[in-house]
Image (tube, rainbow, N blue to C red):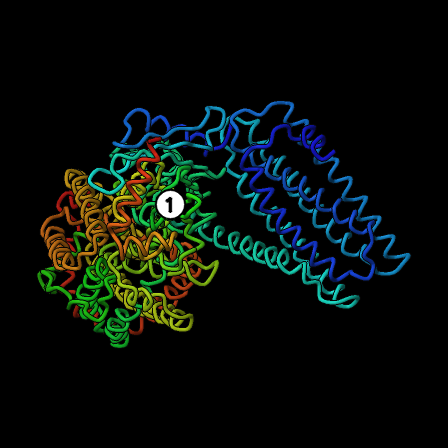
């Protein structure tokens, strides 16, 4: 019997396929390996990312519900909380022990209560409301703060790119 | 050739493995270059070749590590995988040993050279192989069994600790030797730092998780079937249904014991509400201390007055204890100073006496040796079952108490029952013995500001002082109670001797009679109270949960409501016989860490005090007895209930 991580991932996969949240599709890349997931996130409506579909990868640690997974967008996306290489920087993806940004309280960090669905939902809300306090992409944060129009322009471009246009 | 070997041992590398490998290789190459600078004197093609070989082998070690980690994630493991992994580890281990030997001999024969570095490097690699092998074994065992293997994480943690220790020692020795022979090995700093940190973390993990797990095993109750049945019974950690083997944290969240254990190895918080399970237990101390200080003088006075004690005592406990009890719910709101004055209870001294005595008949069993009901309730968690158990012990307790002291046989004494409701406040304050501070926790810390938390956390000295103060107060209260017991004992024996005429040894037969009477009384109480009892248990548990919920939401205003509730409860309790059951409902809270470790000690103290007071009894209280006798005469008929009087 494989570990509890696998069981829990299977349970979450089942849950996500049975009643998927709006604008989110997620599942293992292949059924052989439940520890690598692919997710498609729709840009939330009424934001500059509206209409885009952004693919991302989730890789789970072997002790999954105890440690957070890593999430990385596989497309180009210009956003204050996403590193230029696509890694997502949100507090619930950080284990309580290490504090990469030095500002998060442990209350908003990872705990086994979180799930893939919650992660993806918070990524959606992150897309609609960037947090420029803790920028992973400083350029994007600066543009977002000082030049909202320019930011919207760039976002539109990424949306078009994500749709393959 | 590298690719060929890779194909033989690993087959296709996974993306993550590749990434890992490249990342680590960069560090290794940098460090190798640094090492070159140290040994630039014996720089030669052979030297470069050796370093390349080392690098190459390191890569294989990392890959082996990754592969074994992958075992845990993969749903199916083929025989080919086992074969590859085993042979790879064997080959790597063998090579490492060979190189270490070579390095050792060449150092011995030719003096220290660059071989020293290789020797250490391969020794470190050897520990890596060993760790990988241990992991492999653990994973294999895990795979063999159908159920997840709970202890695997524990073994992993410990083996990591041991290996970390070995590595730290190796590095320290290496650096030491290098400094003596050559110069400071700059290239070893990073891995050394990482190793020390890993070891420190492993040690910390082991300590903290051991504490938390011990807390879990000893302090936190198992979830009852009812609790599991009511509401959502999916364990939030593994997302599976909870049927058995579940624990309830102080914050009322329920998890699988095994899930909780593995989580506590990482974090010592409640997964749902992040209540810190190790820290939360401390705060009650200090505030309790303050309460105690307010309260201490009165019982002590009572003790000093000795003769007058009963009357004072009768009032004082009533005023103090319920106040203290009432203080419980909101003391974590940081309002220790703002503890409200004891609510004016209906327990007015003169009229209450009859009532008390009625109650006392029911609570007899618990009062003589409070430890036993509480130890019974230690294990049982359902509030509803404990009173039954405790009461079932009534007869037994009375009889066991007979041997220790005659005073215990006299069932009704008014001073004690009020003592009991006070008790629930106390046990939580006592820290378990095993380390300085795991007192049992407040139900929630959410409503606290950081500063309040800081205040609660306290410093060692003040905590110890609080504890000592607390113990002293307990002693004072016990002393007071014992005075009461003894007086009743003597009074009751006199009353009974008058009752039963002139039986030469009056105490023994009569007290046994009384014992019977009391047990029948309590038995008679049951049917009367039985209707009320379950109701009470449910309401009480309800108020508890709502209390904690309120506190969680941080509403401080709930305190006044609680006060009212408590007063109402007390009223109900006092007005009817059902108050008995209510009183007893409180007793499960007694079940406590404090009682756990202190029970032996307390028992000793109590015994000694019993002896002490039975000696004092004759001299001290005889004057008062005649006065009291008149009271007792009238009340004794009340105390022995109409039902039981027939038997009497």
Say left or right for B546 vs B105. Answer: left
Horizontal and vertical percent for residue B3? 69, 32
Residue B368 at least partly seen: no
Give the crowd class for mark 1: few <14, some 14-19, many >=20 residues within 10 Å. many
Instruction: State the quadrant of the C terminus of chain A.
Output: top left
Q: In the depicted view, which residue is nearer to us: A68 or B622?
A: A68
In the displayed structure, would residue B326 be above or below residue B643? below
Q: State whether residue B109 appears in this view.
A: yes
Q: Is residue B193 depicted above or below B59 in this figure?
A: below
Picture coordinates of residue B177 (x, y %)? 76, 64
Residue beneath the point at 10% across and 64% down? B344
| Image side of residue B340 versus residue A85, left or right | left
| Left or right: A149 in relation to B6 | left
Q: Nearer the viewer, residue B238 or B395?
A: B238
Left or right: where A72 falls relative to B522: right
Residue for badge 1 = A111
Q: Quadrant of residue B41?
A: bottom right
In depth, the one of A116 and A1 nearer the eye is A116
* Residue B92 quadrant: top right
As helix, strand or loop, the secondary structure at mark 1 comes to: loop
The x, y position of residue B143, in whole percent, is 56, 28
Does B186 appear above or below A92? below
Numbered circles on residues, count? 1
Is residue B256 placed above or below A130 in the rendered structure? above
For disc 1, the chain is A
Point out residue B564 in the picture as x, y percentages from the top left corner.
11, 56
Quadrant of the image occupied by residue B117: bottom right
């Amino acid at each position: 019997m494989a570990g509890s991580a696998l069981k829990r991932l299977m349970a979450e996969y089942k849950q996500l396929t049975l009643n998927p949240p709006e604008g989110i599709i997620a599942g293992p890349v292949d059924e052989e390996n439940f520890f690598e997931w692919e997710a498609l996130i729709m840009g939330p409506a009424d934001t500059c990312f509206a209409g885009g579909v952004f693919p991302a990868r989730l890789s789970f640690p072997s002790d999954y519900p105890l440690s957070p997974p890593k999430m990385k967008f596989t497309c180009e996306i210009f956003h204050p909380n996403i590193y230029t290489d696509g890694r997502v920087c949100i507090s619930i993806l950080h284990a309580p022990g290490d504090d990469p940004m030095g500002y998060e309280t442990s209350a908003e960090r990872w705990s086994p209560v979180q799930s893939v669905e919650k992660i993806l939902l918070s990524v959606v809300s992150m897309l609609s409301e960037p947090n420029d306090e803790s920028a992973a992409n400083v350029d994007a944060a600066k543009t977002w703060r000082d030049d909202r129009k320019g930011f919207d322009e760039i976002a539109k471009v990424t949306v078009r790119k994500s749709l393959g246009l | 050739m590298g690719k060929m070997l890779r194909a033989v041992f690993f087959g296709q590398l996974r993306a993550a493995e590749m990434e890992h490998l490249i990342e680590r290789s960069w560090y290794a190459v940098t460090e190798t270059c640094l090492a070159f600078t140290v040994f630039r004197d014996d720089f030669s093609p052979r030297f470069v070749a050796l370093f390349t070989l080392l690098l190459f082998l390191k890569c294989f070690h990392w890959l082996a590590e990754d592969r074994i980690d992958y075992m845990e994630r993969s749903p199916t493991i083929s025989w080919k995988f086992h074969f590859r992994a085993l042979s790879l580890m064997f080959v790597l281990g063998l090579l490492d040993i060979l190189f270490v030997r070579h390095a050792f001999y060449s150092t011995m024969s030719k003096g220290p050279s660059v071989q020293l570095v290789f020797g250490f490097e391969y020794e470190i690699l050897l520990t890596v192989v060993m760790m990988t092998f241990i992991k492999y074994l653990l994973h294999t065992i895990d795979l063999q069994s159908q159920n997840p293997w709970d202890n695997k994480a524990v073994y992993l943690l410990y083996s990591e600790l041991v290996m970390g220790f070995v590595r730290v020692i190796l590095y320290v020795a290496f650096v030491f030797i290098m400094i003596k022979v050559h110069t400071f090995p700059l290239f070893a700093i990073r891995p050394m730092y990482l190793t020390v940190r890993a070891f420190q973390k492993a040690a910390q993990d082991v300590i903290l998780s051991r504490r938390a797990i011990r807390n879990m095993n000893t302090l936190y109750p198992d979830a009852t079937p009812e609790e599991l049945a009511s509401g959502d019974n999916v364990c939030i950690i593994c997302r599976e249904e909870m049927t058995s083997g579940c624990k309830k944290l102080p914050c009322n969240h329920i998890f699988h014991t095994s899930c909780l254990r593995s989580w506590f190895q990482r974090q010592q918080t409640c997964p749902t509400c992040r209540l810190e399970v190790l820290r939360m237990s401390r705060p009650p101390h200090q505030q309790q201390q303050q309460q105690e200080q307010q309260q201490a003088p009165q019982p002590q006075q009572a003790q000093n007055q000795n003769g007058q004690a009963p009357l004072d005592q009768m009032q004082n406990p009533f005023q103090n204890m319920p106040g203290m009890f009432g203080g419980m719910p909101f003391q974590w709101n940081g309002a220790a100073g703002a503890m409200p004055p004891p609510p004016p209870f209906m327990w007015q001294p003169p009229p209450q006496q009859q009532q008390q005595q009625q109650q006392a008949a029911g609570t007899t069993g618990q009062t003589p040796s409070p430890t036993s009901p509480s130890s019974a309730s230690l294990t049982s968690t359902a509030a509803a079952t404990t009173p039954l158990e405790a009461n079932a012990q009534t007869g037994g307790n009375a009889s066991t108490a007979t041997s220790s002291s005659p005073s215990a046989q006299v069932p009704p004494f008014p001073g004690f029952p009020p003592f009991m409701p006070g008790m629930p406040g106390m046990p939580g304050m006592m820290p378990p013995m095993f380390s300085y501070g795991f007192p049992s926790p407040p139900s929630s810390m959410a409503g606290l500001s950081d500063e309040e938390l800081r205040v609660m956390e306290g410093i060692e000295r003040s905590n110890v002082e609080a504890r000592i103060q607390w113990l002293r107060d307990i002693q004072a209260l016990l002393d007071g109670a014992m005075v009461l017991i003894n007086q009743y004992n003597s009074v009751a024996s006199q009353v009974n001797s008058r009752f039963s005429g002139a039986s030469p040894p009056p105490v023994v037969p009569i007290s046994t009679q009384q014992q019977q009477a009391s047990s029948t009384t309590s038995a008679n109480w049951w049917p009367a109270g039985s209707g009320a009892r379950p109701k009470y248990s449910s309401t009480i548990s309800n108020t508890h949960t709502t209390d904690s919920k309120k506190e969680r939401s941080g509403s401080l205003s709930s305190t006044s409501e609680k006060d009212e509730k408590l007063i109402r409860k007390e009223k109900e309790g006092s007005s009817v016989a059902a108050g008995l059951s209510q009183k007893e409902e409180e007793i499960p809270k007694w079940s406590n860490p404090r009682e756990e470790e202190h029970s032996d000690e307390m028992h000793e103290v109590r015994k000694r005090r019993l002896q002490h007071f039975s000696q004092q009894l004759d001299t001290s209280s005889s004057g008062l007895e005649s006065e009291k006798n008149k009271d007792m005469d009238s009340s004794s008929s009340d105390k022995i209930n109409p039902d039981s009087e027939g038997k009497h």
